[in-house]
Amino acid sequence: MRHKPAEKYSGLTVVIDTPSRFDRHVLMSGYAGAFFDSTLGVSRESCDLRTLSTLNAGYLPNTRVVLLLGCKSLHQYKPGVGLDEQRGNPWMEGNVIHLASYMPQDAFDRKNYFNPNTEYTGGSDDDKATHGKTKRQNWRFWLRKDIKKACRYLLVKPKIEELGEVIYPDIEAVVKDLTETKGKDLFFDVETASDLTLTCFGYGWSEAEAICVPMYEIPRRAYYYGGLGTARILRALAVAFRDNTVVIHNALFDLFVMAYKYGIPAPRKVYDTMLAHHRLCPEVEKSLGHCISLYADREYHKNDGVFEPRNQQQILSLYHYNAKDVISLALLKPKLTIHAKQLYAEDSIQQVNDSIAPYLTAMLQGINYNKQDLDDRVIYNTRYCAQLSRMLKLLVGYALNPNSPKQVSAYLYEGMGYKKPVKDMTNEKTLLQLRLKHPNPVLTIILKYRGVAKQSGQLKFPPYVPRGTTKERITTGYNLAGTTTFRLASKRLLGRWGTNVQNFPKDLRKIFLPDENKVFVQVDQSGAEALVVSYLCAKGNFRSLFLHGIKSHVYVALRLFAEVWAAELGRSVDNYCTAPIAEVATLRGWGELDKLIKSSDNWSAEKRYYFIAKMVCHASNYGMKPPTFRLNLLQKSEGKVSISQAEAKVFLNTYHDLFPEIRGWHRETVDTLRRDGVLRNLFGYPRVFTSIIDESMHKEAYAFVPQSTVGTITNITFTKMQQKIENQKDPLSSMDVDIVQNNHDSVLLQCPPEHVDYVAKETMAIMNCDLVSPRGERFAMKSEACIGDTWGGVA
């Protein structure tokens, strides 16, 4: 099938693999076709639209750009090259520019219509070696960018020629260059072997030239410049780090290697292109390959490197690959800067780049822990799981592996005859739902076994030994681009050491210990997200709670379970329920009632009224529906708190009756999202929504501003405290203080006991920052500090 141009030919030929299931008479029809037409910068009628089967007829005269949509079309020119890898990177065939991308219908479908088993699950965004996988949900974003790029090439032909690369530079020239250059952008990239040994590093001062400096040569098992020469180069590199702005992609990998393996301090002025891109497009992939395809016009090279080279040819390939990465960084930064200015995201990018060195410092330092207590818990958990397995065998009649989805599914849906769900047949939510319908103790045991086994897995982490020490510690790998709200994520550091310490079970935090002669100081934001929500809404009852010192969870519990508190106190609580919120805390007996409500969090599962109220607040603020709320409550309580669908509906409706302004804020948020496609937290940091905006996206939109604002406050506090610690003019620099952990809405520090008050005061002063609502109303975050001899014991 082919549609030759009906209007004057623009020079753009579009080739697709095959017609879609909707293309009976016209190529690229239906919603996908409308998307293609609206994205195209020229008239469809001025293009040559054709399927791959028509290519034998050749191109029209004056063809300048060919857009290949689909794997088969790409493989016509580049056999064996993956579409995920080549997509968005131009190449020349004769005088014609070629560009590959996804088929419109494939990008528009939420799933693979023809073969869901081939669904992409996405790849690692910090994968330095390749372009990285692209999540199917993001295909539409990348296709849109590629179509626009193809149309741009009709107007301005890209410069795809290779720029200057210097391989095997003279050592004296390198040392002089790195030592004497000051105040410039240093574009920097490293390549490492599997043991983190530096095989080479590349640097440059502009896009004109990249210099690749050989380091350890694996075939020779020696450093190229020898021991003394390598030491001179590393010393010069440390000077260059100190005196310039280091432009890098995924700084926490490269800079960790340089600090941990070679003792080079992290630079204090860093521009991470991965983090900058994340602040501009937080939903999409962040690998260097993806960024190159979005912001630059370069041929794809991310498959050229051999990272464990065994011969001279492979070594040269690696060095050229490294130099290309450096030039790519030099091309990316100006484009990112322009985009950031257009989006008013400069402050957001500056904030995340400022935080690189503080978080790297915490990762390098790690946290002390009680190894004996940890080992004892692992042994206990192992025995507990063994006992649970015995119980399962007695109940089921045969050995059943609770961690095997296949075995659990066979027992539930074949053995017991339960109705099989369409998907997620054995996950936690499904098992909890089944337990509501079927009082089968096997379900409880499976859930318990999985929970204990998961805890043991988190505890069985490889210990970390900081450079120059012998004591084992816990560390984590912070991911500054791990969430769309700009809160941090964390995981095992480089896949080698530690674990996710942010989501460590509260009952196990007592294994974390401060260093000798120190105590922990934890500073938390108080009711942070709810406070932000109260100022995102129009002034009403919800904000009144904060203005008059009443915790929202307490007040909601009061209104939902008034008869419970009346029974416990032996008197009516109607006066508290009917009084204006401004007067509630002044009523006689309020202190006793407030304490009673909070204490219910420690009552038996079916009477955890404070916990239920807390969950109601969170669910209602973020637009949760009754079925989801009911299941979420069950899951968060580990199956202990169960309510009916009717109760869930009553609880949520009661909340919105008390605080109608919440739904008003929801409507405003959706209106802004649909109008602009962008939301901003209270620091003005933007989040661009690139996925389809429908009702499923609304909850994420409601949560963005509160969660992003709170996460940003934590990041700023972490960063500023580390900067004060390093500032020799600041009193904190002489107090032996360490900031050791980010826990989303709190920071954990350690210091000698005699400095606790000062450290807490300084941290709270930063955390209690001034904020301004979208209506111009000023307020301040609130925080509280606690101390302890273990992390679990801070109070």
Image (spheres, rainbow, N blue to C red):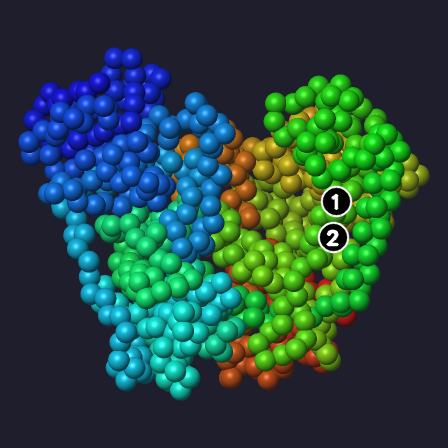
Q: Residue at x 27, y 54 (%)?
A: 335
Instruction: Work out which residue is located at the far bottom of the displayed protein and give it.
Output: 228
Q: Identity of the amino acid at label 1? A: Gly
Which element type, helix, strand or loop, lies under badge 2?
helix
From where the camera sits, is residue 680 visible?
no
Extreme residue in the right direction: 570
Percent of width and height locating residue 142: 34, 39
The quadrant of the picture occupied by the N terminus is top left
Task: Pick the residue in front: 278 or 375.
Answer: 375
Horizontal side of 690 relative to 523 (left or right) equals left
Q: Nearer the viewer, residue 769 or 307?
A: 307
Camera-side mark, 2 or 1 = 2
Q: Quadrant of residue 504?
A: bottom right
Q: Amino acid at mark 2?
A: Ser
Is residue 159 visible to the viewer in this orientation of the structure?
Answer: yes
Compared with 342, 369 (above or below) is: below
Q: Is residue 348 above or below residue 628?
A: below
Disc 2 to disc 1, C-alpha distance: 9 Å
Q: Residue at x 41, y 69 (%)?
A: 219
The residue positioned 55% from the left and 48% from the top of the image is 707
677 horizontally vs 365: left or right = left
Q: Is residue 457 above or below residue 561?
A: below
Q: Residues within 10 Å of mark 2 (few under 14, many from 20)?
A: many
Residue named by callout 1: 451
Q: Residue at x 64, y 45 (%)?
A: 544
Q: Which residue is mark 2?
A: 456
Q: Position of residue 371 (x, y in %)?
A: 76, 67
Residue 400 on image: x %, y %: 78, 35
